[in-house]
Amino acid sequence: EAGVVQSPRYKIIEKKQPVAFWCNPISGHNTLYWYLQNLGQGPELLIRYENEEAVDDSQLPKDRFSAERLKGVDSTLKIQPAELGDSAVYLCASSSDRVGEQYFGPGTRLTVT
Amino acid sequence: ILNVEQSPQSLHVQEGDSTNFTCSFPSSNFYALHWYRWETAKSPEALFVMTLNGDEKKKGRISATLNTKEGYSYLYIKGSQPEDSATYLCAFFKAAGNKLTFGGGTRVLVKP
């Protein structure tokens, strides 16, 4: 079975530029998560989807971050405009239910200069 | 704010030695404790999902124990190998909660 796919793997942009990350979860997984991981810290949840509905976006900085999961499959996370402090790894994960094991993609390492 | 702590932050282990490290989490409202292994440039990989007090789980040379009453879990690596070098993350799932809260991870480097 194919794992969670993320692209790009690495992205370098200048501050104030927009950036988008894409995630394709494991087939059949209804729950999709976007996490932010800063160096030396554990992943922190940004947003959780159940199918196409964002059921927990309380940690998403909505002034500059947005996400969508059209048709309840692929998802895109966008930052506009990016700030220096957004440099981090952005992880996508999926699971078959909200309490079970999560399957992670390899992450996108964002560097904002 | 849930407090999930891992110690130590990093660990250097000689090949062949055994090691262990700790995850501490709130002892109230426990539902599950997850362990993940994250190798550089790869995806975090689930090792264990533990739900019962006293639970012990094993996968190859890696095992974990769980004490929900005192709020800690140990992860053990027996006979460490260079391929065990990774960051090990624990994550707490609260009863009636809706998300995992991760610890900061323990970075393990196994030296040949």
Image (cartoon, rainbow, N blue to C red):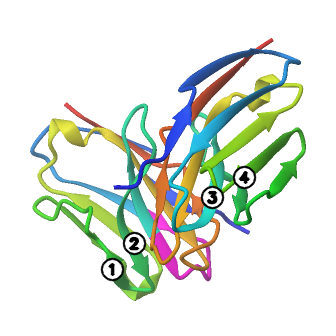
Q: Amino acid at mark 3?
A: Leu
List the residue tagged with mark 3.
B33
Label 2 lies in what chain? A
**Residue B29 in magenta?**
no
Q: Are marks 1 and 2 in contact (CB under 8 Å)?
A: yes
List the residue tagged with mark 2.
A48
Please report the residue visible at 65 percent of the width from the left and 26 percent of the height from the top.
Answer: B108
Q: The C terminus of chain B appears in which quarter of the rendering?
A: top right
Q: CA distance from mark 4 to mark 3?
A: 8 Å
Q: CA distance from mark 4 to mark 1?
A: 32 Å
Q: Are marks 1 and 3 on the same chain?
A: no
Indicate which disc, 1 or 2, sits on the residue closer to the N terminus.
2
Mark 3 burial class by Cα count in 10 Å: few <14, some 14-19, many 20+: many
> Residue B66 got which mark?
4
Q: Is residue A30 left or right of residue A72?
A: right
Q: Amino acid at mark 2?
A: Arg
